[in-house]
Image (cartoon, helix red, strand yellow):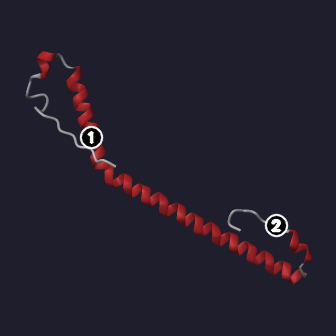
Amino acid sequence: MSLGDFDFGAVSYLEPMEAKLYWFFWVFVVFITCIVFLNFIIAEVSSSYEKVKERLGSLFLSERAKLIEEAQDMLFSSMRNNVNLFPKYLITREIEE
């Protein structure tokens, strides 16, 4: 029912009161199914958001380290040895998944 494969052919054989009751329950079930599916989608999106939020700090620092390394590579060799511009060592760690 939730996938949208509806067969309304049997409704024509129902009494008028039964047909009204059928349509009432059909709308009710479709409405409840939509709410359940939307709730599921919201739960999945919030779960993905929490995963991204957990890694945001480490991702920010990783990108910063890559930018520092790139800036250091672009300098002339005589300027690379200047201790005041860049740190002596740049250590990055990655999580294996």
Lower sequence index among marks 2 and 1: 2
Q: Residue at x 41, y 55 (%)?
A: 49
Number of disc labels: 2
**Tag 2: Cα neighbours inside 10 Å, few (<14), some, or many (≥20)?**
few
Question: Nearer the viewer's eye, disc 2 or disc 1?
Answer: 2
Q: Is residue 40 left or right of residue 19?
A: left
Q: Name, please, the residue furthest toward the left.
A: 83
Q: Are marks 2 and 1 in contact (CB under 8 Å)?
A: no
Q: Is residue 72 left or right of residue 27?
A: left
User: Where is residue 79, by image quadrant?
Assistant: top left
The image's mark for residue 62 is 1
Identity of the residue drawn at 76% across and 77% down: 24
Where is 60 relative to 39, above or below?
above
Looking at the picture, how far across and down is residue 90, in whole percent? 16, 35
- What label sits on residue 75 in the rendered view? none
Give the numbered dot on residue 7. 2
Residue drawn at x 59%, y 65% as measured from the top left: 37
Find residue 3 and report its horizontal and vertical position in percent: 69, 62
- Picture coordinates of residue 82, whole percent (x, y): 9, 24
Q: Secondary structure at mark 1?
A: helix
User: Disc 2 to disc 1, how far (Cα)?
Assistant: 55 Å
- Under mark 1, the amino acid is Ser
Depth check, front residue: 29 or 94: 94
Q: Provide the secondary structure element on which disc 2 rests.
A: loop
- The amino acid pointed to by label 2 is Asp
Residue at (11, 16) in percent of width and height: 78
Residue 93 image position (x, y, % from top left) = 23, 43
In the picture, the quarter occupied by the N terminus is bottom right
Instruction: Please say if 96 is above or below 69.
Output: below
Mark 1, residues whose alpha carbon is within 10 Å: few (<14), some, or many (≥20)? some
Q: Quadrant of residue 28?
A: bottom right
